[in-house]
Amino acid sequence: MSYYDVDSILTDSEKLPCTFELEVPGLGVLEGNPGENIKAGTQLDLPLWLGEMLSIGARLGTSRLVTLDIPSALSERVLNALKADPRTIDLRSLAPHFYSLSERVLELFEEEEMVDVLLNTFAKRAAEIADHAHNPKGAMGQGVDFLRGLDEMERQLFRVAHEGAKEVRVWAGEAKKRP
Amino acid sequence: MAFPLPRGITPPEISFLAEMEMVSILPRQRLEGLELLGGPIEPLLPPRRATLPLWLALLLKRQRRANILPPSWLHPESLSLILDIETQHGDSKGAFSPPPPLPNQPSAQEHYQKRPVAIPHYTPDGNRYFPSSPFLPQNVAVDQGPVGEAPRLPFHWLEVGTMLLEAASDDLVDPDQTRRLLKELREVRSSKMRSGVDVLDSAAVGGNVVSLTGVGAMEIGEGRGFISGVVDGLRRIGASKEQARREQMAGEMGSGGYGATQDDDDDDDMEF
């Protein structure tokens, strides 16, 4: 998690549903009406970095500015689907940085069950990724839907698994080294 | 990202390391002893067998100055036996065939003492030690292996096997069969590595251990990126759970007798 890690920067801009608890003068720009005040009780999707900062009062015990909610990518509906079959879900359409996002969300919320579901999902999908990485069937293969639904962390995993297998094949003389 | 090579060592580097393995050769020409950095090489006298590092043996073989005696595990019979072990233990799924016994393991001691070359070495200070791979004579040809012992794959089996097949296939028994068996073994074992992800799951979270006993150097090199990626991902997702677990443990420690007094001291300090 370096300061220059592009994935962590992009994770920061994932949206998080927030509800304003107080009326804030001059923050209407977030809602799309610059110059106006933002009313108490307004619901807005704010980027993770902003929502985190605004909700910090809640942790200090003073009156909080916003309350956070769990993003739709990690809603009950998604978790139930993941429990049923982790392999058929298109994580990428939920959030391109699904696991990094859930990592950040889990820092904010205590959700024991969500951790278990996500761990199971990751392990099951990792096994599937390894199979695809070792036996690539090309862009038209049957696993193409699954591979399209990988989030960034899983893509990275696919890449290293594929590279590892390929390097060994090149060494053994079974595959040509790329030019 | 700036460094083009992946983390860990690449397959050519692994096979380079494997060239330090000692193999037996049957020299065809005389050669005087060589003083090499890795240790002295005994003089080669044609009818006598000699034990050389693999790189030198391959060099002599390519110059037609020696024949390589294949190690006993690189025999079609031994390989198909090992393949049976790998495929038939369906109950202990994910277990690899056991590696060769180390000379200082008590259970293996009696087996190993029958072998001609398991000599304890001495450091310059006179301490006795047993060498580990690649300085174990795992690839040396033995006239008759220990009776009743199943053949074992050494740590560098894939590298040594492939290199011998490439350079000295005429010295091997039935090279085509050997090549086929090696390929099959590799496929069986690599699919086991992949199905071991389920084990990784419980290992990364529950603090258990992943058993990679019997896995060869090249297989570890192949799976390094993937395995460490999976474990790292599991760690990151489970970080909050782990945090909670630690806090709970710390709380339990704190409520105990000794821990409680410690906490009181800390609180006192805070007030000053």
Image (cartoon, helix red, strand yellow):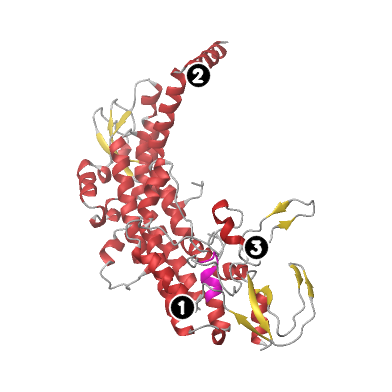
Q: Mark 2 to mark 1: distance in Å?
A: 62 Å
User: Of marks 2 and 1, which one's residue comes earlier in the chain?
Assistant: 1
* Amino acid type for the residue under numbered disc 2: Gly
**Comparing labels 2 and 3, the label whose residue is closer to the camera:** 3
Numbered disc 3: what chain?
A: B
Numbered disc 1: what chain?
A: B
Which residue lies at the image location 30% right of the left edge and 62% below the top edge?
Answer: A148
Name the spot of residue A52 as percent of width and height, x first: 38, 35
Q: Which residue does the numbered mark 2 point to in the structure image?
A: B259
Name the spot of residue A18 as percent of width and height, x first: 29, 35
**In the displayed structure, would residue A135 be above or below residue A85?**
below
**Comparing labels 3 and 1, the label whose residue is closer to the camera:** 3
Task: Let me know if residue A12 appears in the view.
Answer: no
Do discs 2 and 3 belong to a common subunit? yes
Q: Which mark is residue B76?
A: 1
**In the displayed structure, would residue A43 be above or below residue B47?**
above
B123 on left or right of B242: right
Name the spot of residue B59 as percent of width and height, x first: 67, 81
